[in-house]
Image (spheres, rainbow, N blue to C red):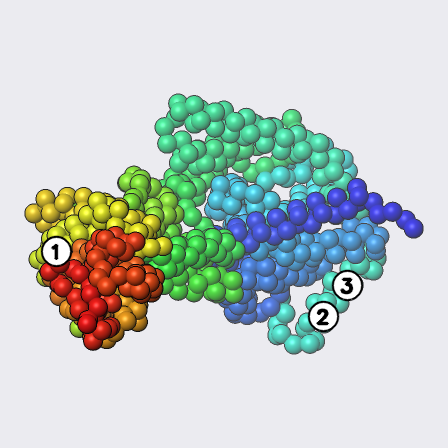
């Protein structure tokens, strides 16, 4: 398999890129031509074509005028199509008249004649096809007008000024002017030289006669008299006759004797070196002049040189041409019809024709093409789309109103998209393109203004948001909240838009974190107030719910912070007195539990396995007591004090309830045990009859704190807690009574044995503690009072007789 040639591929890519670049440049140059230039092209083309078709008539009048109008109109629309049509008509007219003058038949053999016809018509038709600019059409027109000027003695000197003017106005297209001038003038000038110079000379060596040198620049007034014929009517017969005349010249064999056109042509060829040297001298001097003039302009030695430099150069070139044309005729073997008047008129004519260039505005003008408009509009549209992304970012993350820049952006986007659509479809004329180019610049500035407006709005909002954040943090700290949320942002005036958006997002994010932090404080405070002070309140705090709703909707957090702050202040104002009262109740209620630390010797007997738990409660109560004393020292509680108070109150109520429940259960258990141990139902013992009821009532309330307002509980709590000491003492007594009753069966057995031996028993006779021994004797008596007598004063048990 043959490997691909990377070298050939590279050349192909380079060539394709070059062709594409050339096409784009040509399109850009064509689009840069104004509507005014089109009108000028139409008028000058009309004049040039009318004169050219009339002086080289192919059709009868007034057809050349109408054809000139049509050619000018087509050229106005499409120069590439109009000028070849005009060139074809004029070229056919030239060939027709050259055929009538038998010029073509003397050019050599048939192939040479055919080549002449083909080359001449190709140059007339194809060269305009290569260009698609109005300046190229005007350059062709100037070449035709320069040729037309040769037909009249008073105007022939204008041929050179017209060519130089073409160089000034159309620059690189001056070649078209020169080519058309040569195509039209050279054959007729050669024919005129042959008929009116060569043929009249009788001398055999005619070329030695003075004035027989071939002309380089002369009027065509003589030959113009031979060019008057044309088709009498535009019909197939006349048209075919014209074609046959031209075609017949390629095969016709002239039978002329003596001098022919070939002799005149040989004389031109003989003088060709001199003619070429003349051209070289004129062009060389002109280029040298241009070089030094440009140098002086660049160095600033000639002020405003860019304005008069083209006119000055063209005028000086005309002067050089006419002076050298007059001075070098003999030396360079050519003739020219140049007089002092001709030189002055030629120089002055060049000055007049190029003078308008001095009044043209040479400041850079924007000349746009559809492609440039498309590229520029697309670039601007991309920026607008990127800006819309920034707007969406703002709307999604920042609660600020951006309807003004958003609306302006939509209008701007529609305008740019419309321009882009029409430019891509090549719907704009050049004037519209220039206007659109300027309009895109204005739209670009509008986009910058909209971006600046958004930046200003965001800067103001950043300052506002940071101020709001700092203000609310300060207020919350003053209210007693230990706020942890903070933020640090940059306040540069000229921050990029993206950085400013991020800075605002940081502040807004910190504001929302602040809402969450305050909500986390407000919610438990409400959870204290509602159950403890006002159970009729809604289950959820409206302020906390409102703040949560604002967070979900991603709205500005400041109104949520304000709602929470106001709610906290309202709660503080409305329930502060009750909370303060609760604090005092708590302080007064802690002492009974805290004092249990000082009754450690009786606690095991009362609480048993729960003794360690009770001692822990006593220790906690001591700590709560210290905090309560600190709160009592404040004139007004802080919000955080409320949270701490809730924990203390609820913890203390639970602690008190647990203690009272333990005491209540212990009391009930001991009483039931004692009742079960009693040897008789009539036995009276140290039962605390009301304590059980009071403990039951206290534990009922403390076990269901949500059913009461907190201060209903707190006002009774000191009274309930007084039951602790009473209960401890009572349970201590009950413990002795249980011990007493548990040992009674032993005591009863001992008494029975002793009574077998004695008639009379004293407490000292029993193996028990004295207080228990006396009580055992009394209890024994109550179960057998029919058999025994008991002396309560002397504590003596005796048998009845």
Quadrant of the frame with the C terminus: bottom left
Asked whether disc 2 touches disc 3, contact meaning CB atoms under 8 Å apart, the reply is no
Residue that carries the numbered disc 2 in the rendered image: 241
Residue positioned most to the right: 1
**Which circle's residue, 2 or 3, is located before the other in the chain?**
2
The numbered disc on residue 585 is 1
Q: Residue at x 27, y 70 (%)?
A: 678
For residue 134, side relative to residue 261 (left or right): left
Which circle, 3 or 1, is nearer the viewer?
1
Asked whether disc 2 touches disc 1, contact meaning CB atoms under 8 Å apart, the reply is no
Q: In this view of the protein, which residue sits in the foreground, 687 or 612? A: 687
Which corner quadrant of the image does residue 6 belong to? Answer: top right
Residue 503 in picture, x, y percent from top left: 34, 46
Q: In this view of the protein, which residue sits in the foreground, 65 or 344? A: 65
For residue 597, side relative to residue 352 (left or right): left
Residue that carries the numbered disc 3 in the rendered image: 247
Cα separation, mark 2 vs mark 3, equals 10 Å
Q: Residue at x 80, y 59 (%)?
A: 250
């Amino acid at each position: 398999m043959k490997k691909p040639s990377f070298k050939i591929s590279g050349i192909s890519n380079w060539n394709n890129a070059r062709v594409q670049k050339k096409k784009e440049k040509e399109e850009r140059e064509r689009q840069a031509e104004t509507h005014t230039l089109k009108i000028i092209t139409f008028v000058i083309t009309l004049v040039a074509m009318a004169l050219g078709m009339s002086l080289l008539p192919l059709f009868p009048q007034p057809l050349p005028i109408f054809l000139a109008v049509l050619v000018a109109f087509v050229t106005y629309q499409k120069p590439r199509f109009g000028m070849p049509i005009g060139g074809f008509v004029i070229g056919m007219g030239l060939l027709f008249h050259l055929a009538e003058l038998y010029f073509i038949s003397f050019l050599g053999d048939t192939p040479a004649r055919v080549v002449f016809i083909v080359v001449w018509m190709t140059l007339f038709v194809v060269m305009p096809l290569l260009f698609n600019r109005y300046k190229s059409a005007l350059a062709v027109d100037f070449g035709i007008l320069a040729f037309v000027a040769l037909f009249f003695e008073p105007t022939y000197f204008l041929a050179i000024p017209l060519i130089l003017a073409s160089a000034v106005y159309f620059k690189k297209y001056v070649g078209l002017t020169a080519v058309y001038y040569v195509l039209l003038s050279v054959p007729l000038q050669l024919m005129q030289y042959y008929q009116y110079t060569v043929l009249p000379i009788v001398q055999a060596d005619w070329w030695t006669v003075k004035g027989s040198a071939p002309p380089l620049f002369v009027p065509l007034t003589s030959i113009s008299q031979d060019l008057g014929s044309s088709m009498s009517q535009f019909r197939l017969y006349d048209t075919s006759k014209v074609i046959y005349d031209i075609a017949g010249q390629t095969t016709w064999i002239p039978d002329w004797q003596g001098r022919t056109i070939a002799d005149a042509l040989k004389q031109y060829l003989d003088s060709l070196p001199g003619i070429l040297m003349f051209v070289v001298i004129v062009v060389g001097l002109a280029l040298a002049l241009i070089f030094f003039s440009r140098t002086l302009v660049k160095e600033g030695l000639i002020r405003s040189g860019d304005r008069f430099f083209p006119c000055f150069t063209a005028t000086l070139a005309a002067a050089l041409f006419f002076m050298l044309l007059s001075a070098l005729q003999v030396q360079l073997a050519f003739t020219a019809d140049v007089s002092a008047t001709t030189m002055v008129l030629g120089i002055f004519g060049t000055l007049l024709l190029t003078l308008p260039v001095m009044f043209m505005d040479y400041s850079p003008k924007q000349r746009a093409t559809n492609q440039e408009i498309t590229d520029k509009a697309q670039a601007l549209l991309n920026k607008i789309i990127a800006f819309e992304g920034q707007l969406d970012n703002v709307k999604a993350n920042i609660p600020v109103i951006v309807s003004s820049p958003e609306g302006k952006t939509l209008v701007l986007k529609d305008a740019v998209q419309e321009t882009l659509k029409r430019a891509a479809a090549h719907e704009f004329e050049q004037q519209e393109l220039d206007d659109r180019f300027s309009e895109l610049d204005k739209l670009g500035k509008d986009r910058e203004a909209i971006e600046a407006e958004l930046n200003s709005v965001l800067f103001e909002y950043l300052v506002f948001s940071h101020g709001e954040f700092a203000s609310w943090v300060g207020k919350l700290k003053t209210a007693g909240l230990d706020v942890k949320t903070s933020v640090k942002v940059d306040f540069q005036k000229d921050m990029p838009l993206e950085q400013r958006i991020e800075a605002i997002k940081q502040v807004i994010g910190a504001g929302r974190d602040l809402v969450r932090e305050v909500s986390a404080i407000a919610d438990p405070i409400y959870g204290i107030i509602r159950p403890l002070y006002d159970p009729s309140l809604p289950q959820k705090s409206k302020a906390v719910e409102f703040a949560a709703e604002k967070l979900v909707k991603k709205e500005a957090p400041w109104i949520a912070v304000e709602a929470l702050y106001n709610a906290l202040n309202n709660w503080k104002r409305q329930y502060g007195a009750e909370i303060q009262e609760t604090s005092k109740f708590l302080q007064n209620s802690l002492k009974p539990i805290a004092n249990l630390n000082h009754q450690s010797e009786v606690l095991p007997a009362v609480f048993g396995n729960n003794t360690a738990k009770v001692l822990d409660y006593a220790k906690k109560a001591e700590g709560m007591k210290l905090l309560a004393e600190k709160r009592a020292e404040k004139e007004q509680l802080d919000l955080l004090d409320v949270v701490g108070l809730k924990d203390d109150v609820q913890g203390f109520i639970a602690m008190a309830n647990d203690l009272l429940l333990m005491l209540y259960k212990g009391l009930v258990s001991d009483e039931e045990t004692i009742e079960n141990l009693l040897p008789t139902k009539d036995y009276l013992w140290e039962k605390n009859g009301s304590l059980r009821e009071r403990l039951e009532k206290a534990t009922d309330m403390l076990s269901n704190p949500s059913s009461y307002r907190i201060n209903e509980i707190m006002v009774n709590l000191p009274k309930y807690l007084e039951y602790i000491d009473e209960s401890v003492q009572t349970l201590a007594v009950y413990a002795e009574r249980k011990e007493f009753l548990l040992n009674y069966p032993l005591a009863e057995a001992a008494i029975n044995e002793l009574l077998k031996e004695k008639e009379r028993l004293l407490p000292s006779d029993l193996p028990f503690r004295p207080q228990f021994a006396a009580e055992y004797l009394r209890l024994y008596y109550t179960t057998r009072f029919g058999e025994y007598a008991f002396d309560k004063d002397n504590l003596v048990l005796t048998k009845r007789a």
